[in-house]
Amino acid sequence: MAQAHPFPKASRGLTLVQAGAGLVGFVDTFPWKTLSMRPSLKTRKPIDELKPADLIAFPIWEFADDEEGDEEQDETWVRPHPAKMMGPDLYALSVAADFLASSGQTFTGFVGVTTAGDLEFGHGVLLHENEHVFVPSAEYPQAKKDRKAVAAALRMKESQVFPLRFTLRVLLQGEVALRHGEFA
């Protein structure tokens, strides 16, 4: 599981906050407060087909497991979650996030989030050059091996990627600061 770090919120864009040579955090400056279109049957797709534009239009996605009986849909299909922020008692959401590699390179992607009980961050996915790069959580049995695969997919050294920090693009209900974490 990635570690959650609360950081302060600002008002317009994603700004990296540093103190000397050390990373202090990110400040949210994206206006992710409203959805740009309505969810529909046409917005459902396999999770490995999510694109950056999908994450802008709908920053929260949920598995459409109650629709698995529909033609051509299986357990990999997701649909936009209609809320503008994450409420309580939700499982296995895919939430849009901005990532910062230790080299300073930025990536777009999403993080698995569960809000039922304690907030939990699961695996991450980087959307890089039309590919989905799986970022394992620390609890994943093959995490160490898969970290090498992440670096190779990005054509970077492992030390240039990790620790890989992220900032979710949406708020948790009742909070005023975006959540942050890292894949160490």
Image: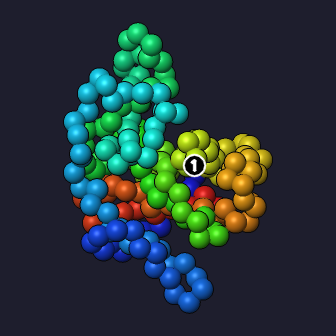
Find residue 129 and report its horizontal and vertical position in percent: 58, 47
Q: Nearer the viewer, residue 144 or 103?
A: 103
For the image, the number of numbered tags is: 1
Q: Secondary structure at mark 1?
A: strand
Find residue 90 and report its horizontal and vertical position in percent: 36, 40
Identity of the residue drawn at 54% across and 63% down: 106
Report the coloring of the rendering: rainbow
Relative to 17, 20 lies left or right: right
Rendered-image quadrant of the C terminus: bottom right
Is residue 145 placed above or below 26 in the rendered structure?
Answer: above
When asked about the image quadrant of residue 105, the answer is: bottom right
The answer to whether any part of residue 89 appears in the image is no
Tell me the residue that label 1 is attached to: 128
The answer to whether any part of residue 67 appears in the image is yes
Q: Residue furthest front?
A: 129
Identity of the residue drawn at 29% across and 70% down: 12
Is residue 82 placed above or below 24 in the rendered structure?
Answer: above
Q: Residue furthest bottom?
A: 20
Is residue 68 placed above or below 51 in the rendered structure?
Answer: above
Identity of the residue drawn at 34% across and 68% down: 13
Is residue 140 placed above or below 25 in the rendered structure?
Answer: above
The crowding category of the residue bearing disc 1, from other C-alpha atoms within 10 Å (few below 14, some 14 to 19, many at least 20), is some
Q: Nearer the viewer, residue 29 or 24?
A: 29
Identity of the residue drawn at 55% across and 42% down: 130
Relative to 174, 151 lies left or right: right
Find residue 37 and report its horizontal and vertical position in percent: 23, 40
Tag 1: amino acid: His
Find residue 145 and report its horizontal and vertical position in percent: 77, 47
